[in-house]
Amino acid sequence: MSSDLKVFLTGASSGIGWALAEHYAAQGALLGVCARRRDALQSLAANWPEQISSYPLDVTDVASLRAAAGDFIGRVGVPDVVIANAGVSVGTLTECAEDVEVIRRVMDVNFFGMVATFAPFVGELRRAGRGRLVGIASLAGVRGLPGAEAYSASKAAAISYLESLRLELRGSGVRVVTIAPGYIRTPMTAANRFPMPFLMSAEAAAPRFARAIARGRSYVVVPWQMAPLGKLLRLLPNALYDRVFARAPRKPRASG
């Protein structure tokens, strides 16, 4: 990997984002990292003071993201890789009135936040004729899961959005990469009260993500053992899918 690689990354304060930031920094990359938690970002940047610029912000704040993107480009140039990783996950139930705003927040962060992350960079990358736009989706977006209306919907939206963007940028030199993780050990999955097959640490997942990004793969599942499940879920007829998954374990609700 070239030591002059430039990476802009959201959701960098923990989990997959933190692991990706450390992976790229260890390879000599220059990074712009974003997250809401200022203290965590400062801690990350302190590990790599010559390589990391930190931007405490919420990815639903379009103006702040645009300002961060402009500052990063001004400091180091147009990035080679932009990773929209920020995300939230919590169980939701539409029948619960208090969950309506939770559902809105999940959609705002996981889907709209991805759009807002890419928006300041698409034109710059197109003009440069190169680069990677990377969206962290989820296998949970392949089919709707019970008790996860917001999370499944947000990741399904992300997958379709990334596919549309990939077509939009075809032939421009800019690759759009969709990464659909299975179970990765992060603070987000720590709340799960059910078995998680092929659970992988974020530190082990990060180099796999980076290889897929470098290759410009259009869609990749990590860990690979979950890929057949993703294909099977797409093919199952509704009657069979409903029978199998109606009683699937649910993620705890924020207010539950």
Image (spheres, rainbow, N blue to C red):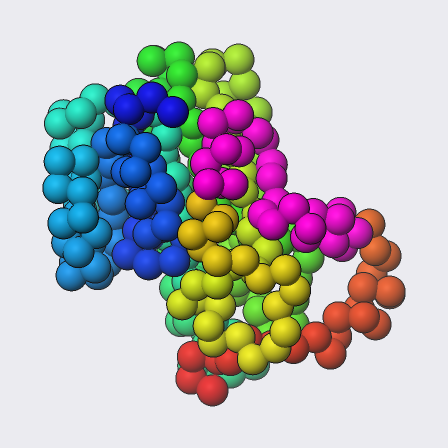
Residue 160 appears at what percent x and percent y?
Answer: 58, 41
Measured along the vertical axis of the image, is residue 60 above or below residue 208? Answer: below
Q: Can residue 28 be seen in the rendering of this structure?
A: yes
- Residue at 83% x, 55% y: name it: 236
Measured along the vertical axis of the image, is residue 76 above or below residue 242? Answer: above
Q: Which residues are magenta?
A: 207-234
Q: Using the image as rendered, state which of residue 8 and residue 121 is in the foreground.
A: 8
Give the quarter of the image for residue 62.
top left
Residue 40 appears at what percent x and percent y?
Answer: 21, 59
- Residue at 40% x, 71% y: name it: 101
Q: Is residue 78 magenta?
A: no
Name the quadrant of the N terminus.
top left
Q: Is residue 228 magenta?
A: yes
Q: Can residue 164 be seen in the rendering of this structure?
A: no
- Residue at 52% x, 62% y: name it: 151
Q: Using the image as rendered, state which of residue 77 and residue 234 is in the foreground.
A: 77
Residue 115 appears at what percent x and percent y?
Answer: 40, 41
Residue 11 appears at what percent x and percent y?
Answer: 33, 52
Q: Using the image as rendered, state which of residue 6 and residue 245 is in the foreground.
A: 6
What count of labels does the image hold? 0
- Residue at 31% x, 45% y: name it: 22
Q: Main secondary structure of the magenta part?
A: helix
Give the quarter of the image for residue 27.
top left
Q: Using the image as rendered, state which of residue 116 and residue 222 is in the foreground.
A: 222
Measured along the vertical axis of the image, is residue 16 above or below residue 93? Answer: above
In the displayed structure, does residue 36 sit left or right of residue 123? left
In the displayed structure, does residue 124 sit left or right of residue 110? left
